[in-house]
Image (tube, helix red, strand yellow):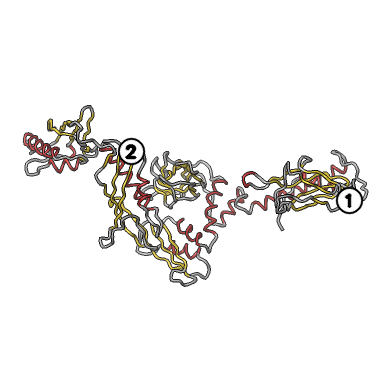
Amino acid sequence: MSFVDRTYPDVVRDILTTLTGGVAAEAHPADYDDGGALPDVHLQRRPVARVSQVSGLVAGDAGADPVPVVFGLDDYEVLPGEDADDGSVLRFLGTGRMPAPGTDIVVNYYPRTADPTPIRDVAVGSVARTLVEAVAREIATSYAQLNAAYEAAYLESATGSSLDRVVALLGFQRFRAGRPVGTVRFTRRPGAGGEVTIPAGTPVADAADTMRYETAETRTMLAGESTAEVAVRGATAATPVAEAGALTSVQRAIAGIDRVTNERPTTTAGADETDVELRARVRVALVSAAKGTLPALVNGLLALPSVRAVNIVERPDDVPGELAVAVSLQTPAAQIPAEVTDRIEELRPAGIRVRVEQAADLALAARVGLVFVGGSLPGAERERLRAAARDTLVALVGRAQVGQRLRTGALQAALVDGERIVDAQVHLTLLDPSAPDPAGDVQPAPGQAVRLAAQDITFDVDVFDAPATATTAALPVEVHAQVRPGGPDTDPQTLTSGVTARLTAYVAALTPGTTVTAQALLAALRNDAAYALDPLGLIVTFRAGDTFVQVAEGGETFTAAAGQTFTVTGVDVI
């Protein structure tokens, strides 16, 4: 039997109806026929002298729960039944409110054949009405207490300490004040359409995974949205406060998400976690709590900080009752961690044997070609764009699931921002020299997980979509060097002449697209047999018209462009 909550006005009305000889709360199902019409309602205690109230439920907006209403004469009419004075038939007009299908139509009415009652004065303030209202108040209070106890048992309706007890069944506790909180911004991957759902509990960490946060709410990025800002909390009470831009890694793959960052630093929460935030966080855990299913195994394993990706194969050897679980760890280990095997034992279906193994790493290398907008770009800006492209590739490959096909088209689309980079080419190869060239997408085996390290990414010569033509006039570039002797025995004259000769030969050999760095200059200018050169005192200035670039240790780089001619204007010894 299901519990039905009743309010004080309902209790008073039904008691008064019964006390005065009427029929209270007679229910009739709202069963529509195949044509969508609602049949007439025939009251049971015919003939009927008067209908006092018709109530029920109407459909809510946008799939919400039905809403209780009291129907009026604009919604239904009373028709005669067996004779002209019998109002025992109710017909809904169809032009007003209609009962929701599958609900009950509740009618209070007075039969014509009811026994006389000695209670005739039920006006407010009368003795009978006062006694009825006193009893009804106690009954309504009991209903309210029963309803509160009923709702306290469910995640969606429990509040306060009752909610704490409900989530404790799943091993969760309310986050208390003092835990770091903040917001992160998720960005959609270019070319990814449709809605993208970011579930509560999604782990977000820094690049080295030294601090981990979790989303505190579920957020759906609509088809027309490119970013979504989501609240996060520290995964543990010991999680430190994160500086702006520190949280850049999503530790669980989400289709359609390109990157994440916190634009503002996180702060320490001054209040406990709210009921709404706690429900959102625990609701996701219910998927894993339903033990014995594949989604429970997958979500339960992905919730572990040490697990990066999971792949489960049913009946791996065509043997019923077996599962093969391949787990890719954040940091490869010699054996499967105990927390992984314990979680599998906790969530596996009863009577099912699970074979778990660490997913084999499929190490990749990537060669990237970028096409920049325009005809030129400062060397420092190009290096920044290359570094961003390298980070994007590492993050995308790191979020690939075990056995998931790695598509080069998706990687290339993620590198194009439409403003500075207008096109990109990504060629993936396997680090194993004996393995064949994939020549396109990479399809790992069911028990393999792809990995890509930043040092295994190389870049082709940069290309511009509007390069300088051969007829472009030569652009003179003045080169001036400032050097410092590497020791007291170094002769300044020898140092000046030696650096001038080597610098002249170096700039004369520069070709378009060559990037000049401090390390490259030091290697070209040093002559340990003739003089000592201090690396930290080397500054070379490239000046073209009103613009200049100073190349030094820890500073900018210079990239040679088509049509440039270089002239060494001097070398100063400091």
Q: Is residue 138 left or right of residue 217?
A: right
Q: Is residue 279 left or right of residue 339?
A: right
Q: Position of residue 281 (x, y in %)?
A: 52, 50
Q: Position of residue 403 (x, y in %)?
A: 39, 60
The amino acid type, in three-letter code, at marker 2 is: Arg
The residue lying toward the viewer, choosing from 460 and 558, is 460
Q: Position of residue 299 (x, y in %)?
A: 48, 57
Q: Is residue 3 left or right of residue 442?
A: right
Q: What residue did someone put label 2 on?
A: 420
Residue drawn 26% across and 63% down? 434
SS label for mark 2: loop
Lower sequence index among marks 1 and 2: 1
Q: Position of residue 311 (x, y in %)?
A: 43, 61
Q: In this picture, is 439 found above or below 62?
A: below
SS label for mark 1: loop
Q: Dot 1: few (<14), some (14–19), or many (≥20) neighbours within 10 Å?
A: few
Q: Is residue 81 left or right of residue 381?
A: right
Q: What residue did someone put label 1 on?
A: 82
